[in-house]
Every structure is written in structure tokens, then in C-alpha cells.
Amino acid sequence: MKTIDPSLIAAQNDKLARHVHHDYEHLGEQLARRNIDIETVRARVAAFGVAIPSWGVGTGGTRFARFPGQGEPRHVFDKLQDCAVIQQLGRATPTVSLHIPWDRCSDWSELRQAAEAGGLAFDAMNSNTFSDQPGQPLSYKFGSLTHVDAAVREQAVAHNLECIAIGRKLGSKALTVWIGDGSNFPGQQHFRRAFDRYLDSTRQIYAGLPGDWRMFLEHKICEPAFYATVIQDWGSSFLAASALGPQAQCLVDLGHHAPNVNIELIVARLIAAGKLAGFHFNDSKYGDDDLDAGSVSPYRLFLVFNELIAAEHEQATGFDPAYMLDQSHNVTDPIESLISSAAQVQRTCAQALLVDRAALDAAQHANDALTATGLLQKAFQTDVTPLLQRVRLDAGGAIDPIATYRASGYRQRVAEERPAVKGGSGGIV
Amino acid sequence: MKTIDPSLIAAQNDKLARHVHHDYEHLGEQLARRNIDIETVRARVAAFGVAIPSWGVGTGGTRFARFPGQGEPRHVFDKLQDCAVIQQLGRATPTVSLHIPWDRCSDWSELRQAAEAGGLAFDAMNSNTFSDQPGQPLSYKFGSLTHVDAAVREQAVAHNLECIAIGRKLGSKALTVWIGDGSNFPGQQHFRRAFDRYLDSTRQIYAGLPGDWRMFLEHKICEPAFYATVIQDWGSSFLAASALGPQAQCLVDLGHHAPNVNIELIVARLIAAGKLAGFHFNDSKYGDDDLDAGSVSPYRLFLVFNELIAAEHEQATGFDPAYMLDQSHNVTDPIESLISSAAQVQRTCAQALLVDRAALDAAQHANDALTATGLLQKAFQTDVTPLLQRVRLDAGGAIDPIATYRASGYRQRVAEERPAVKGGSGGIV
Amino acid sequence: MKTIDPSLIAAQNDKLARHVHHDYEHLGEQLARRNIDIETVRARVAAFGVAIPSWGVGTGGTRFARFPGQGEPRHVFDKLQDCAVIQQLGRATPTVSLHIPWDRCSDWSELRQAAEAGGLAFDAMNSNTFSDQPGQPLSYKFGSLTHVDAAVREQAVAHNLECIAIGRKLGSKALTVWIGDGSNFPGQQHFRRAFDRYLDSTRQIYAGLPGDWRMFLEHKICEPAFYATVIQDWGSSFLAASALGPQAQCLVDLGHHAPNVNIELIVARLIAAGKLAGFHFNDSKYGDDDLDAGSVSPYRLFLVFNELIAAEHEQATGFDPAYMLDQSHNVTDPIESLISSAAQVQRTCAQALLVDRAALDAAQHANDALTATGLLQKAFQTDVTPLLQRVRLDAGGAIDPIATYRASGYRQRVAEERPAVKGGSGGIV
Amino acid sequence: MKTIDPSLIAAQNDKLARHVHHDYEHLGEQLARRNIDIETVRARVAAFGVAIPSWGVGTGGTRFARFPGQGEPRHVFDKLQDCAVIQQLGRATPTVSLHIPWDRCSDWSELRQAAEAGGLAFDAMNSNTFSDQPGQPLSYKFGSLTHVDAAVREQAVAHNLECIAIGRKLGSKALTVWIGDGSNFPGQQHFRRAFDRYLDSTRQIYAGLPGDWRMFLEHKICEPAFYATVIQDWGSSFLAASALGPQAQCLVDLGHHAPNVNIELIVARLIAAGKLAGFHFNDSKYGDDDLDAGSVSPYRLFLVFNELIAAEHEQATGFDPAYMLDQSHNVTDPIESLISSAAQVQRTCAQALLVDRAALDAAQHANDALTATGLLQKAFQTDVTPLLQRVRLDAGGAIDPIATYRASGYRQRVAEERPAVKGGSGGIV
């Protein structure tokens, strides 16, 4: 697998290393004054990773248009190659999450070997029953796992079971189920019956789940259904996950909630209930905008991580969240967006590790709101850039991964190998 | 109890009765063509009632100001008198819901007799731990049932138990618990611990609940806490109600959700889970605006009732919702707003009874969204005014209750008896 | 142009006409009691029309998928045929609004004749610079009328001028300009400079506008840009329209606003400023959902029409709004959705005509909010179905246009003539 | 005026000064590598100030309750004393903004002297026509500047003119006009006529404005009116300010917009139009929550400042914004919240000064969204704490103002002098 020449990375790093070490040292001093050992933090940050969705390395789009870039990946092997570059430079994305049917291939062991060659493993499998594929016998136009017709539901269940089967071959340990089922008109769907059908279908999938797998249920307030969705919020997701059993948990995509909703509070509720599956990270200003993680509301992301680190700190029962980026890269090079988004998530994790939890407990018990919130702000305001740079440097990655990527000419090279894709959908309005 | 002179009502009705009978007959004809028996619908509508909150008969306000009207009720007996007038004219509000401590009185049996004299019974009791009362030992500034200090929680629990004790004397069968607890700053409150304290406190209240009572947990996304609330949505409410036991259920106030949230879908989920306590009806455009029910989004109210009538039709297990108005009458005479809001809720109930459920089932099974939604629209577009007028007329109420109320001079009369209340809060900004 | 056999329409009408006349008579009686002459209302409703967008007759989709139906129109002539059927049955949609480049054809006079044969005229022209077309020299990936590169802006200006040229051949009198320009990242675009470029580009288009044309500027809060759009709200639209001149006005699409925004208030502001271009009607629950008009919030649509009828009543200066449906029909037959949506808009117009404006004025002057709002409710609650049926019947349309359409077998017939379109975009996530 | 003993401040500073100088030096080094001169930034930050509203030093509340703290200020002299302490310690709040009638006093020159003694000047005057005062002849229940009754409007105009007269005595140079006028019911208010009355009333106020004053019009989407407000958004505010003349401008309160609205974009539009009056800073998650500035969305505040610094950098015509905090301190000591909020605004200003504007221009011209947004992030991620500490230290303030304030015992001291205020409104629901 052709990635970036390590000597280029080394050369780029050489130009910056002196400053990184100097800044790191000063940061260590500052943290020491706050009774924080920078080395401990560094070790934890180095161990942190977030998965890349295979579809993320292609240029995204909207219902209005898609504007492909150069060198779009043609198939799952191209996607793996791009993911390997992301991980090589950024060192925060050790796994890839596949989407079936788009990532189907003829030889799964070849794929597994390719991943290993690229320093990658496989994260959760993703099924797709929200669009029709060529040759598919029955349509999902009016639903999949909740369709009124049992035959459609069976087809959708079988597809999910196939995803599990593929995942077993690849070493995956989880299945993420997101459906587009819902309705566009009041009255179109019987709410309670649709939910019952969802439970019935997911029970069949759950029954096919290996004992060491988990099943991630993903809720979403709207889109593609615009009046109601079947799993519209964490409440419905929780009802379903509870009905299914301990291996079923609730996945939080940061862009899938109503305006103003306090997501970190939902995270806390799911942790307390032992039902937090993990995250699809992205950012949003209006809806499921799928913007780069932390690009619009970095403090919101921090407040989510604050809950995660607190849960870890307090050893919350059954706490083991999975992390994945899930963004739509419409105007940037997807590789660049994924590298920088992973770094942003990693940065946020590092900042949350700096919260003085004992002092926070004390402030909360004293109803000293100003001190409590100030402790979070202090952690968030800390510039942990040198720490992230050291983590990458130590792991063989790039101090400045975007600059190194641009210097490498990777995109231009693959553009030559991969023929241009013609324009996007343009015209669905 | 001095209400409206029945001869005035009769005289007012006489002017309108002929048209009511004529319009009712024509509506009956139209419904008969749709295979609906108007008499059956009328009987069901006549049996429908919605409670009045005792605080609703006073003029409401905002944090900026309160502009009291004439003849504001001074105590619970005045409030009962106003409620009796509302019921006398509108015949859709047979019960009153009290709020302690505001409705405390020295002789509960006298109060019960006064209610009976006014044709009223007592609905759910409401506790108040969101504001401090003169002489109260401990403050709720930083929470009540979830306060970090056990002594404050005990005080709040004791208050709720007192509400139950009062309610037993009055024939109430439910306690509604809404708290203002939450936080205004990230970090101020430990989310999981606050929720645990809530469970601990409500368990103590639940333990004091008579066997034939229910406990209604009311969620709210924000206000008075503006960063996070402890019971922020139906998901948290459901977690708590499940932890408490079968007598605990989830109350839906229509104004307590995030923007865009599909409330009728939440209602369906709670029905399916056997956890729908009932409703606080009002309308809203921005937040918890507490506008008159159905005044801004009448179709949303209809879609909620569509779920309720469907659940009744399908004999959903444990379905027995309680209905109450919960509005803030800032610019209208509260008596007028309550009469017309109750009529609006009653109208919506009547419309939902007109939905052709067999045809709706068929359309849903055929994925015929246009027909399905058209069936709801047809019911909603039916002008059931003559039916509501007949229901009032038959029960001794007023065909046009607002006009009759205005003709009665009731407000001017009580204004003479009840001294003017001085201005509102003015100045909390 | 092969539409529906008039004898089928007549036969269908015959079955219902007796009840329509009877119900119409009773409605007339009821309105007479309210001092409203039903014939006057009928004449005004009969004169009301709303345009169909040519793209509306195709099945819509989302960024996740498109599920085409049978007999999808292949080109503008097929679209005109479908529009002719809609108008033949519903009699509320006398015009069609074209979208270039999708509706380009080789012979515009042939198209004009086809329209006339179908009883149709041409409404506003719509340009498209939000997606790239095959063979297009420069891409709109990073903007069109506001692109940083002058050459791209010139291309987009030229396209708009071409739309005017085409429209002149077809008898159109307006150009609607909606752009997808904006940004997905903070910092991506210089807000003030982008707006200046917008003004510069639109001035060039405006300069090419015939003297009897208008230019409609359409604002939208987000999508396809998800951090910021150039013409994000009516304020920016108004700034631009004012800068351009009297022929430029602001178009309101009901789905293009932030959550909770009071759209009827914006309409009032634009009327007062003489800048209301008109409407793109649809409904929405979450964002730009493009649901069928009035299907989710019929009272909101009524409140908009209340402003329009009031402006007409008060002879507001320069008041001459254009009406168009703009919906995405994802799960219904587009012809059915357009017929019923047009009828819904027509119904709402009829209801707004029933408001007692003198009484409303009086109530507003007396600060009698309950009476004022009750006057609006009374108009909205009136079931004007018989009036709409009469209007259709008198004009040669169908009393029950959906039933007649289904009985006609039109969709099956065109499905044979028009080859199946392959699936949708499926895969832009 | 008794503030904090300077020797206490000096003693507290002594403990921290060494680290401040060390950290400042390292920050200077880092910035130098980015070609930024820390001294230049420091000078600009030192010159930055934000006004304190006189009402901000009292404990705020909600419509549900107010929980006063100890030592609440009793009158405007107490408020000035608290403001002097805030400025003494934080050195970022050199001015105070008064609210009439609450800040009325018998001797304005005495007040002016008191302010000077406390190192304070007077910022914009604020009128209040959203609540009734004892003895006020006419009520604002149904509006003030837009009331249907001309006599009420005259009273409201006269009050605003009085505010100007008072402000002239105090050296103020601006009048801020925010009204609560609007409606709670569809139909209650005639939208266009209410706006006309607003223009008529404000024209009379504008006519009384001294030539060197400005008039700030403040818009708000809702509350206390919950269906519609007269100046609901920046569009309406802009229409009014344009109608009035060049001294009228549009004030932006960060909490007064619909959910999801891009406020920094509005700021850019107002700058371009020469109509940006300035800001009321606070933060919000749900509505007009009036939380501490930057406490929930610090990056949003940064993006606003990014527009401001860009406008300054590009010498935008007529750019001269006024800055004020406008928060409701319900659960913190108001003095602490105001000190830390002013520091947060100051911090954000400093961060925005670090943006590499030349590089940003280049990235924007190259459509390099990732680089552009990265430049903003880099500035925001910089920890400017040492710079703020130096600015305070140099000006005689406290390095850690909250700790110093707590050490001073100021609150306890004034609590002894100022008798306890009884509980809040409790009961407006």
C-alpha cells in the first residue's frame, strides 16, 4: 500500500521539532503548577483513537449537488489506502468502519491483509437500508426494518445479518444500525406499530449477534423522513436497546438532535443507564450538517468529553464507548478534514483530562457555580498543541500533518491513478 | 357561591338556539354520509373534561413584569368561585388542580364543600419546591429534590408528602411533581449524581403514595435552569418513572420540549410503554410560552389527540391520561382564556373522534401517505362548532360562553369585592 | 396533449354534485349570518392561482436516496403534460415555473404552444447555479454569484441572463434567483466581501431585466451551505433588493427560516416595505423539509394568508405577490401532492377571506386579544370544502380531483410511455 | 467610596507575579514565531472595556423565583460601589449603564462625583417601558411606544426623553431603547400598524437626541411577548434605524435571536450597512437565558469578535460599537460573574487580535476552507491568560480577581450595611 514516504515526514518534522520540545516543556511546567503530570496525560492521549468511516474519504454532498474532488477512491481498497495515509500522519485513527453494500469486495481476507499492511483494523460494521441498490428485490422507499410488508423487513434483517457475517471475517466487534424509516406526513405511519416492527426486526438481528459483539442503535430526529422518524431520540433508542438486551446500546451522533438540546446531558443519562454505545463525531449549526468535529462548537465537544472522562474517572459500570468520525466533506479534501478532525477530537480529550476533578467535586458540593465552571474553562483554555505534536512525533506521525500531507503530493498522485468521477446528483430538490 | 344567574344564561341561549339546532342537524347529515353517528360523538365529547389549575385564574406574568387585571382572586376560595363560573358556562372543566403552598387554607373540609357547591371536584395536587416561601427554613436556590444537601432534600420530600396528605382530604388521586432543579453553568452540577438524588428523593415520596394514587413526573428542557435541567426530557422522565414503579408516570406539558420536537410521537412512545400520565395543555411558539391551548398550532394539538383517540380505540394497556390546562394569561381575562381554551381542547377531541380509523389503517398498510394524511385533514377541517354548542346547551352551559360571561358583569362584580392587587415583579431582568 | 378524458371527470362529478350543492347552500346560509356573501368569496377564490414548478412533477429525494415512481417525466414536455393534468382536475394551478438548465429544449415556441394547449402559461423563470452541469467550464463548488473568481461570477451572471432571454420567449415576467453560495467553515468566506460580490453580480442581472419584469431574491438560512449562507434571511434579502432597485423584491419560501421564526410577521414587514415578491409554498417541521403545503402547520399558512388578505383589503402600496408551490414529493405521486397542495393553499386563501376585518380592527383597538384571535379562529374553523368543490366544478375540474385522477389511470398510462428511471443518488452521506 | 484595600490586591498579586511574568514571556516567544508582537496586542487589550449595566450587580431571577444573595445593592449608589469594585479588580469595565426609573436619584451631580470617585464613567442610558411603576398614570400592559392609545405612546416617549435629559447630566452619549411590545395571540396586534406607531414614537425620541448622541434600537425575537414582537429581528431593527437617521443604529444582544441563527453573520451585515450600534453580551443555550458571556459557547463569541477585529482592521466606515454585559446572575455573586464575564470578553478580544488576517485573506481567495478555519482555530486555541493577567497587573488590578475578591471579605462587609432583601417574585407562572 503506497502511503507517504517516511523520509518526507521525518524531514518535515525536523524543521519543527525544536519548538515542539520547548513548548512541551513549558506546558509541562504550567501543568505541574496545577499538580498535573504531563507524562500521564500524554500516555492517555497517545492511547486514544477514533475510527474513520470508509465513506468519509470520498467527497460528500447535499441533495442539491455533489462536487467531487480529484482522486476520489473507487472502491474499498482505495478507501483503505486513504485511511492508511490519515493514520500514518495523524496517528489518532487506528481503525476503519465499513459500510455495506458500498464496501463489498470479492476477497475479505485480502481486504483484512490490506488493512493490516496499512496499520489499520476494522471497527463497527454499518448496514444500509436507507437506499435501494441495483438489483435489490424489494424497495426501501416506505421503510426497511419497520416496513408494513414483512418481506421487506426480512430483506433488511438479512442484510444486517450479512453485515455481521462480513464483520466476523474482518475482526469487527459491533454492528451499527441506522435506518431512514419514518414518515413525511401526519398519519402516514402508525407510530406504535412501526416501533413494534422495529423491535421485532432488531430482535432477529440481535439474535444473530456473536456473544462478544455489540449492537449500536442510532437515533435521529429527522432526515430523510421529515415528519417523524422511528428512532427519533435517545428515549426511543433506550427503549429499544433495553428491550433487546445487554449487547444493545445507544449510539450518539452529535448532529442528530433537536435544536438547543443538551447533548452532554444525554450522554450522562446513557452512561448512568449503562447504555452508551459511543459516538459519531461531527459538528453542526443547523441540523445534521455533518461539519468537521469541533469546527463550530468546540466547547460543546469538550463538555461531552468532560462527561466521558468523569465516567472513566469514577469507573462507571459498563462504560466502554466507541468513537467514530462521521462527517460530510463537501468543500475540503476529505483526507485533510479527517486528519484535522481526529486531532480536534484528540485535543478535546486531552483538555478534558486536565480538569481538576477533586476541585470540581468540591465546588459542586459547595454550590460554587463560578468556581466549578471556571475549572472546566481552565482545562479548555489550555493550549495542548505541544502535547498533541509530541504524541504524533513519538508515534512516527507528522508534527504538522496537513502541511506534510500537502508537501507529499499524495492527492495529485492518486488523481492520476484514479479516473475522475463525474458530477454529483444535482437536481434532487 | 355566587356564580352567573342561570336565567341570564337561558336568555342568552334563547337567542342562538334555533341556529345551533339547524347547524347541528346539517353537521349530523354530513357525518352520516361519512358513516359517523353524531350522537355517539356527542356523548363522548360530553363526557370529556379538562382540569383547571388554581393558579390559572390569576393573571400571569413574565420575568419582566406582571400586569394584574381587575378582581384578581385573593385566596383559594376566590379561585374556586372563578373556576365554578368557568365550568358553569363552558361545561368542560369539572375539576380543579391545587398548588401548595399557595392554596393552603385553614379548613379543608370547608374547601371541599365549597367545591361541591360549585360543581367541582379536585384533580392532581401540585407541589412547589421551585421558589422559597416566607419562613421556609432552607432555600431552594440551588435545588430541592436534587440538592447536594440532604436536609434540603428532606424538606422538599416532606413538602410533597404534605401535598399528598392534603390531597387525600380533598379526594385527589394524583401528585404532580415538577422541579426547577438544574444548573446555569457547565460543571455546576454533577449530572449523574443529581439524577441519583432525584431518584432517591422521589422514591421517598412514592413510598408515601396511597395505593390508588398516581405520581406524575413532569419534564422540561429548560427554565428556570438555563444550562441543564435534571428531568430535561421524556427519556429522563421515563427512566425515573420506571425506577419508581407502576404508579409513577410521565406528564407531558406541550411547551416543555426543544424546538421542532414531534410531541405526538413522544405521546405514542409513552402510551406504548404504559407510562403516559397525561397533559398540561397550552400552546407555544418559542419556548414554554404558556399561550392558550391551540391558539398558535391547533393542528399539533389535533395530532396529539389523534394519538389519544387511537390508543383508546385500540384499547392500549393502562391508557388513562389526565388532562389539565396550564397557561399563563398575561393579556386576557383568565376566566375567558380558560373557557375558550377548554373549548378548544374539547373541539380538538371531537375532531379526533371523526377520524375514519379503519380507512386510516388501510391507507397505512398500503403506504398511501396522501390518503392517510387526507383522512386526518378531513377530520380536522370539519367544523364541529354546532356539536360543542349542543353539548354545552344540553348540560346547562352557555352556547356562547364568552358573550354570556361578558353580559353577566361577573368580573366587575368581583372587582368590587376583591381589592386591587399591586403591580407585578417588574425588575427581574 | 393527452390529459384526462373530460367525460370521466363529468361522470365522477355527477356522483357527488348533489351533496356539493346542498352543502354549499348550507355554508352560504351560515356565512350570511356572519354578513358574508358566499358568492363574492367564491369569485375571489376562483380567481386565485398558484404556480407549479416544473421540477415538482418529478419524485424528489434526499441526500440519502431518491426512490423514483412510475412514469417519471423525461423532459419539459412530459412535465407540461403532468402540469396540464393537475390544472385540468384541480383548477388552481394555471401557470408553470421553469428551471434552467433542466427545462432547456430546442424549440421554445413549440413549448409555448404545448403549454397553451394544456391551458397553461409560464410563471417566473428559475436559474440554477447551485450544481454543475456536464460540460460547464467552471465549477460552482465554491460559489457562483459570490465566487471569489470573477470568471465564475461572470458565468453565473450569463446563465441568469440566458434565463431571462428564455423567459421572454415564453411570456414569463420574473426571474427567481436562489443561490447555494455560502460556507461550511468559520473563516471560509469573508462575509462582507461575499455580500458585495453578490450585489455586484445581481446588479448585472438586474441591468438585463426587461422593464416589466421583476427579480425575486430568495433567502435561506442554510443548506447546501451549513455554516453560513450569503442571503441568509429576509434582512439580507431586503438589503440586496433595496440596493438593486424597485424591480427587485424578496421571495419567501416557508421552509427557509430558523426554527420558531414568525414568518407572517416577516411577510408583514416586507409588505410594508413594498418588497414582498411572493412565496414558495411548502410545509416543514424541522428545516427546509419541503413537505406538502399546510400538511403540518395549516394554521401557520392561514396566518400568512391573513396578512395577504389584510394587505389587499387595505390596498397596501405595491402589493402584488407571486405564488408558487415548492415541495419535494418523496413518498407520494407528485401529481396527487400538487393537486392537493394547491387545493390546500386555495382553501387557506378562502378561509382568510372570511375574517371579519372591521371587527378585527375594533378588537385590536380595544386590546381585546381574545376576541381578535377568536375572529381568526372562526374563519379558520369554517369548513370551506363545499366552496372549493363548487369552484372546481364550475371551472370544469373535478369535485374530488384525487379520486378522479386515480380512476383515470393516467399514471399507469404514462408509465408505459416513459421508461423507468434508474434509482437515485444513494450514497451521498 | 469603600472598595478593596489596595494593599490586599498587592499582597495577592505578589504571590502570583513571578509565574505571570514567566508565562507571559513564553507566550511572547510563541507569538513572535507567528510574527505577532505581544506588546502591540497587550496595548490593544488594555484599551478594551465593556460597560456594566447597573441592574447587573443585583441577583437576577426568573418568572418562577428570585433568590437574593447577601448584601444586595439598595440603590444606585450601592450599585456604583459594586461596579467600582469590579473595575478595581478586573480593569476591563470602566463604565456603567443606568436604567431609569430604577436608578433615579435626587442629585445627579452627586452621582456623577461618586462615579468619578470610583473610577467610573456613564455609558448608554436605558429606558424602561416594559413594566409599570407605582404611580404611573397609564399602563404598559398592552404596549408602550406602539400602544394603540396615543396617550400611552406619549407617556413612553416622554420617559425616553427624560432618560436623555438625565444622561446629559451624567455624560452619557447614547440611549438604548428596548421595548416589550408585541402580542401573545395571532390577531391581537396589527403588525404593520404597530410598526408604524413604533416609527412615529421613536422619531419623536430621535428628534430629542443631542447631536453627539446615538440611539440604539434593540431587537428581540420573543419575551415578554410570546407570539410576536414589534422589533423581532435585525431586519426590523434595520428598517427602523434607517427610517430614523444616521444617529440610530442596531444593538445586538447575543441572546435575542431564533435558535441556530448565525449571529456573527448578522454582525457583518450591520457593519457593512454602517448600522452596528454595539452589543449586549451574554450567553445562551435555549433562549434569552442571560448566562455569563462565553460560558456556554465561547467560540461563538470569538467568531463575533473576529468580525469586529476584521472590521477594525479593514477600517470599515462608521464602525464604532459599544460594548455592555447584560446577564442575569441567578446563582452566583453578581460581582464575581461580572468580573469573570468581562475577562472572558476581553480574552476573546485578545484571541481575535491574534488571527493572521493576511493569511486568512489568502486562504479565502484560494477557497482553502481548511486553512482558513484553521487560522481562526489557532488564534482561539492560544491561551492568552498571561496576557490578561499582565494587563490587569499593569493597571493596578488583581492577577486573580476572583480570589482577591473572596479574600477581601467585601460581600460580607456590605451584607452588614445593606439589610436583607426579602424573597423574589415566586408565583408568576
Image (cartoon, coloured by chain):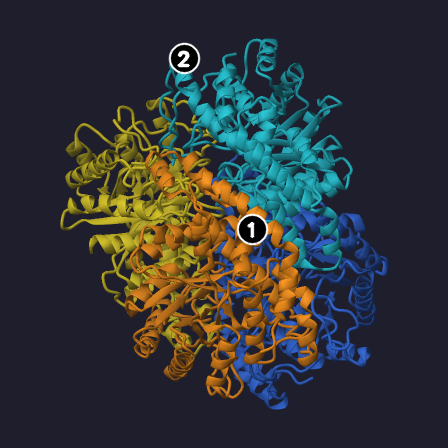
Chain colours: A cyan, B blue, C yellow, D orange
In front here: A385 or A24? Answer: A24
Tell me the tag on residue D385: 1
Q: Nearer the viewer, mark 1 or mark 2?
A: 1
The N terminus of chain D lies in which quarter of the figure? bottom right
Three-letter code, disc 1: Thr
What residue sits right under mark 2 in the picture?
A417
Label 1: few (<14), some (14–19) or many (≥20) C-alpha neighbours in 10 Å? many
* Residue C381 screen position, x and y as percent: 46, 61
Three-letter code, disc 2: Glu
Q: Which chain is home to disc 1?
A: D
Label 2: few (<14), some (14–19) or many (≥20) C-alpha neighbours in 10 Å? few
* Residue A208 screen position, x and y as percent: 71, 22
In front here: B167 or C208? Answer: C208
Place residue D344 in its image quadrant.
Answer: bottom right
* Residue D137 screen position, x and y as percent: 47, 88
Q: Is residue D78 above or below residue B167?
A: below
What secondary structure is marked by label 2?
helix
